[in-house]
Image (cartoon, grey):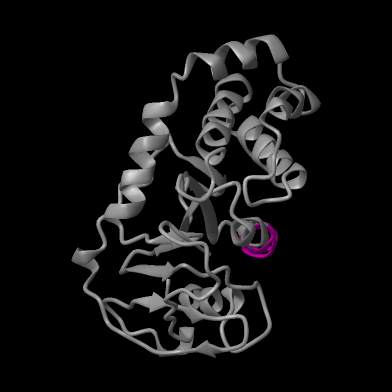
Amino acid sequence: MEEQKRNALTVPLAIVVAGALIAGALFLTNKKSPDTVKTDETKIAKSEIQIEPVTADDHILGNPKAPIMIVEFSDTECPFCKDFHTTMHKVIDTYGKTGKVAWVYRHFPIDTLHSKARKEAEATECAAELGGNDGFWKYIDGIYKKTPSNNGLDLSLLPKIAEENGLNKTEFETCLNSGRYADKVEKQYKDAVAAGGQGTPYTVIITKYEKIPISEGAIPFSGGPINMKLILDDLISKN
């Protein structure tokens, strides 16, 4: 969870237990400090969630035609995003293999906190250009393994991560230096803002019937009163 204007752990957070999902629409936010978690619920109409539709141009892990699409807007230098990345892999291991859930990764670099994240986002796109969808996912996994978060990754490692994942280092560097994916990253940043994102990770779950935003929360896979497993089990039973 990262705010754009201040690096504080206390952020607005609101979320609704999956069992309380109401047909039509639901807004989940989360308000979390180091010591407390407050749960609350607010309804929001589906029409208020303005998000670009998922297409073949997206980076998708899992079944592209899954009835439940989890669109994550993320910043590779956000420590909460790093945690949530592990959570989302657990989601796909649990639900993706049966084709019920897919994970869509989009960029949301918070420049005021993480000046390196935008270039890292461009690097993942170069990995996708050279290695396809698999290349993208291997590369972004590599970034999260290498970075200590909070703008701590040495950008000179970006070509090395590419090489470690089987990509041509020279071609990768040419792509990255060209800046040709800067516009794509900026477009996804604006999409995150339009969809209601104010911090990272910001997630929108899309089903046949509704769009469910999970604001500024690195929700765990299981455990505690609110978790991804609880939410997804409920949604799967309805979709």
Q: Does the magenta segment cover residue 93? A: yes
Residue 67, can we see it? no
Q: Is residue 133 above or below residue 192?
A: above
- Prevalent SS, magenta region: helix
Q: Is residue 239 left or right of residue 83?
A: left
Numbered range of the magenta stretch: 86-95
Q: Residue 28, position in %: x, y?
A: 40, 77
| Residue farthest toward the right in the current orientation of the protein | 164
**Residue at point 70% right, 25% down?**
156
Tell how many labels: 0
Q: Is residue 92 left or right of residue 184?
A: right
Q: Is residue 66 left or right of residue 42?
A: right
Q: Residue 203, position in %: x, y?
A: 45, 61
**Residue at point 52% right, 80% down?**
32
**Residue at point 56% right, 83% down?**
226
Residue 140, can we see it? yes
**Residue at point 33% right, 78% down?**
26
Quadrant of the rendering where the C terminus is positioned: bottom left
Q: Residue 24, position in %: x, y?
A: 26, 77
Q: Is residue 40 above or below residue 13?
A: below
Q: Is residue 223 above or below residue 97?
A: below
Snapshot quadrant of residue 154: top right
Which of 97/161 is in front? 161
Q: Residue 136, position in %: x, y?
A: 61, 34
Q: Is residue 65 left or right of residue 27?
A: right
Q: Does the magenta segment cover residue 212? A: no
Q: Is residue 118 above or below residue 114?
A: above
